[in-house]
Image: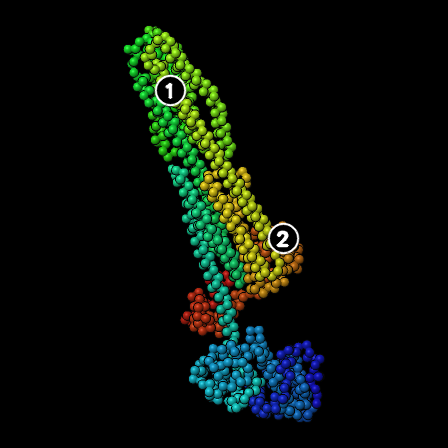
Amino acid sequence: MVDYHAANNQSSAGGVQTYMEQENDWDRDLLLDPAWEKQQRKTFTAWCNSHLRKAGTQIDNIEEDFRDGLKLMLLLEVISGERLPKPERGKMRVHKINNVNKALDFIASKGVKLVSIGAEEIVDGNAKMTLGMIWTIILRFAIQDISVEETSAKEGLLLWCQRKTAPYKNVNVQNFHISWKDGLAFNALIHRHRPDLIDYDSLRKDDPVTNLNNAFEVAEKHLDIPKMLDAEDIVNTARPDEKAIMTYVSSFYHAFSGAQKAETAANRICKVLAVNQENEQMMEDYEKLASDLLEWIRRTIPWLENRTQEKTVNDMQAKQEDFRDYRTVHKPPKVQEKCQLEISFNTLQTKLRLSNRPAFMPSEGRMVSDINGAWHTLEGAEKGYEEWILSEIRRLERLEHLAEKFHQKAAIHESWTDGKEAMLTQKDYETSTLSEVKALLRKHEAFESDLAAHQDRVEQIAAIAQELNELDYYDSASVNTRCQKICDQWDVLGALTHSRKESLERTEKQLESIDELYLEYAKRAAPFNNWMEGAMEDLQDMFIVHNIEEIQGLITAHEQFKSTLPEANKEREAIQAIQSEVLKIAQSNGIKLSGANPYTTITPKSIDSKWEKAMAMVPQRDHALQEELNKQNSNDSLRATFASQANVVGAYIQAKMEEIGRISIEMNGTLEDQLTNLKDYQKSIMSYMPEINKLESYHQHIQEALIFDNQYTSYTMEHLRVGWEQLLTTIARTINEVENQILTRDAKGISQEQLYEYRASFNHFDKDHSGALMAEEFKACLISLGYDVENDKQGDGEFARIMGIVDPNGSGAVTFQAFIDFMSSETTDTDTADQVIASFKILAADKNFITPDELRRELPPDQAEYCIARMAPYAGPDAVPGALDYMSFSTALYGESDL
């Protein structure tokens, strides 16, 4: 006997498949079971006849009818579609062996190992060898090419059966023997593909013969599957023959292969539609979030641009408190929304690129750049509003100080002028003696001196009123009225003074000289009295300072004033000595004084009284200045505290900004590790938030103390807020970039090693660590990866095509995400419009249109209705009522036309 396996080892070694090697290890001991051998004879004979009848012949006895090799060669020609060598027609044994060898050679050429099966055994009618050979042929030509979801042959056929019968009760396909005994699995396969042929609900699990006969008869009559077994063959065997069942089931698989293709096509369409629906939802979410954020900005900016002035400092401080509430309560959530909006936009664009869809273009005015522009306008208005509030507080403080000073000086002046007009208009000199007239004249001269001394105060009152008008004081009208009244009264006093002087001088010639001592007293007492009034006015003067230097200047001036008090006291004692001398002369000469000094109303008592008041004001002034010094020292401490914290926070933010820049370039490990590390890093940054809040608290104390400058630090709270927001946004963007790389890797099937290689190449040519490659850097990177673009000129050739892909906006820079998208598109495959059209064509049974009923039958309900709502009516010459155009719909999915 010829060992055909040994003879063909060398010729067939290169094309043998593992599965065939395992199945061709024919277990002859199994054929010792007569029931299994009977089942195989019947099944294999029916299977061979289902193909031989195409050539107009058949076999009756499987081991006898293949002995001469003629029908065996014919069977191989029919099932393979190929021509075998011309058979030998002789009746001799050698002719038969040669024919069988030709058939075995053909089987071996298909990569099949025939273990211990020789031509002599077939020619001799060896039933075991013949059945083994036929099983090998069935495996190679009926089962091996079955493929379901990356499984093939026996496993693929079993998976196909499990998927098709899964929805049916009482069916659990786990093998190719006892799982088929009750006949329900055969009926379920037919009902799944042709529900019109089987009433599955009428079948009973306890009636296997009826079930099997029903399935075999329906398959033979309607599906052109010959009856390969009798129901009794299966039912009366404890474990039906696996090969017989596999052969029978493979016939059902090939009969329904067209339906399998339709299912695959439907799955492809479902996948494409699901991606499109998800992208549309993300687009709607982006549009709504963008609209809400822009509307909030639109409502907020007019509030920040409102410059309605308030009348008092308290009112402006209430506005300042409202602005602080906006900064700490209302704005932070909007900062988060803006960051989330950018992240959603980048994620959507990444998903669109990965699914081969056109980029998302938000509606007009809702681009990320539009939102950034509106945000920049908002922050500009915010900065201007804060500066305006501070300037208004300064202005109102100044106004309140000036108004109080104006009314104080006006009250002093009005008190001094009270009765002066009546005094100047009296005619007392007409009935006075000479001495009395002379006294009146001297008194009038003293009054003129006093009037001249008060001229400066009147000018100060007018100057303060003018400044209040220039600073837009809310009660300027009453100030102007009072000032005008003072000025008018001053003019009247000047005229009356001049008139009275003329009258007195006309009568002076008739008067006696008067007591020189009285006159000297009056002349010296008047300026000293004015000095004391001026000193008391200065001691009661309101002051406002903003730093230690200013208060120290006031203290220095006050100390200088106190240094003049001994000299002033000498002048007071000299004036009082004059009055004492008058009394002494009168007593010495027996002169009876008629009354007070006729030349002045200033009495020694009033001088002493004013002096005592002035001396009592000095310690009060000392105390007020010391309190203000303490306040400024406290303010300086607040400045130092804020500066200390601000310098630490500013250095921290700057260091972290530089650190995140290095991390985004130097990250290693898997993308998941990088993402985890970045999120941990983000948490560590957020843990610093209490320091920011502490600084905000210091800043609030600074503002409440009305401190407007700080020489201890160059940082402002606004600068640090912007830096902190930029740090948080940069970390979020870096995390989003890694998440998009993971999405790209998973969607495109890029390995971790490829991503490392791409990142290493990108970083190598990113010399300035900017996170983007300029055109020449990107070109050098492509050359290092094997692209032939070295001799391309600017704007020409392959390099220009690639730049059009990675830099569609023509910015001249290529980001790492664009680089990854390009490299992944070069190495992976994605769904295309042509593939989707081909899938729809399978569902439409090769027609150029598809009907709503076909869509509802093949697709899930929601996706079927999605297609029906968006497909245009088909207008071709072969159109039927309700026909839909699936070709234009498919191209619209990929942006090649309008959906």
From this view, report whether residue 780 is shown above or below residue 249: above
Q: Is residue 852 left or right of residue 103?
A: left
Q: Considering the image in quadrants, where does the N terminus appear?
A: bottom right
| Count of number-bearing discs | 2
* Place of residue 581 in the rendered image (x, y in percent of width and height, measured from the top left): 40, 12
- The residue to which callout 2 is attached is 766
Instruction: Name the one closer to the observer, 212 or 90.
Output: 212
Horizontally, residue 385 falls left or right of residue 9, namely left
User: What residue sits right under mark 1 in the picture?
Assistant: 605
Q: Is residue 821 visible?
A: no
Mark 2 or 1: the one toward you: 1
Lower sequence index among marks 2 and 1 = 1
Between 138 and 177, the residue placed more toward the observer is 177
- Residues packed near mark 1 inside 10 Å, few (<14), some (14 to 19) or many (20 plus): few
The residue at 41%/32% (across/down) is: 401
Mark 1 element type: helix
Q: Residues within 10 Å of mark 2 (few under 14, many from 20)?
A: some
Q: Amino acid at mark 2?
A: Asp
Circle 1: residue type: Lys
Mark 2–mark 1 distance (CA, rounded to whole Å): 93 Å
Work out whether residue 675 or residue 528 is closer to the camera in this orientation and state it. 528
With respect to residue 552, does 355 lie above or below?
Answer: below
Residue positioned 61% across, 56% down in the render: 667
Q: Is residue 24 above or below residue 350?
A: below
Q: Residue drawn at (50%, 47%), measured in percent from left and top?
A: 694
x, y percentage for residue 502?
34, 12
Coordinates of residue 115 in the picture (x, y in percent): 67, 84
